[in-house]
Amino acid sequence: MELYFGSFKPEDKPESGEMLVCFSIPEVGIAFKAPFAGEELHTEYASLLTLLEFIELNQNIFTGKELKIYGTNTDMINQVNEKAVCQYEFSELLRKALEYKKKYNYKLGWIPGENNPSTNSLFD
């Protein structure tokens, strides 16, 4: 099952620091967005962790399925895939993502922003 996450900065509030935490699971028709105050990498981690918490709370949808999760931020993806060093301020978020990875054995990969349904179909 393919799942997508990402962050979005509303164009009408460029200086507010407000972003959106987003995830999408097209196969089951789920799309989620919520406001979040943080910079880009922090919001990307928040988006991934929100998706992973959703998986944990809705096991009936995901049991027995291979989870392929896609995002657009290569820095964060490399950190979760343990191919890059994490900045100290994000180490607790990384730890949580890795705990979920052990628990659900998800695969995390990159997708171009224009192909990411979690952020490019927000207002459809």
Image (tube, rainbow, N blue to C red):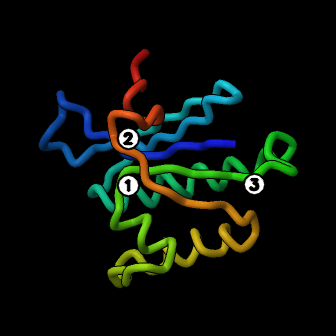
Report the Cα–Cα distance between label 1 and label 3: 20 Å
Instruction: Residue at 42%, 71% (x, y): give it.
Output: 78
> What residue does disc 3 label?
56
Where disc 1 sits, the SS reads helix
Q: Is residue 28 above or below residue 113?
A: above
Outermost residue to the top: 124
Report the Cα–Cα distance between label 2 and label 1: 8 Å
Report the Cα–Cα distance between label 2 and label 3: 21 Å
Name the N-terminal-most of marks 1 and 3. Answer: 1
Q: Is residue 21 above or below residue 74?
A: above
Determine the image quadrant of residue 45. Answer: bottom left
- The kind of residue tagged 2 is Leu
> What residue does disc 2 label?
20
Give the image location of residue 87, x and y in percent: 33, 81
Give the image location of residue 102, x and y in percent: 71, 74
Q: What quarter of the picture does the C terminus occupy?
A: top left
- The kind of residue tagged 1 is Thr
- The kind of residue tagged 3 is Glu
> What residue does disc 1 label?
43
Name the N-terminal-most of marks 2 and 3. Answer: 2
Determine the image quadrant of residue 9. Answer: top left
Question: Counting other residues with Cα less than 10 Å from the Cα at mark 2, is it few (<14), some (14-19), or many (20 or more)?
Answer: many
Where disc 3 sits, the SS reads helix
Instruction: Residue at 43%, 54% (x, y): give it.
Output: 110
Q: Are marks 2 and 1 in contact (CB under 8 Å)?
A: yes
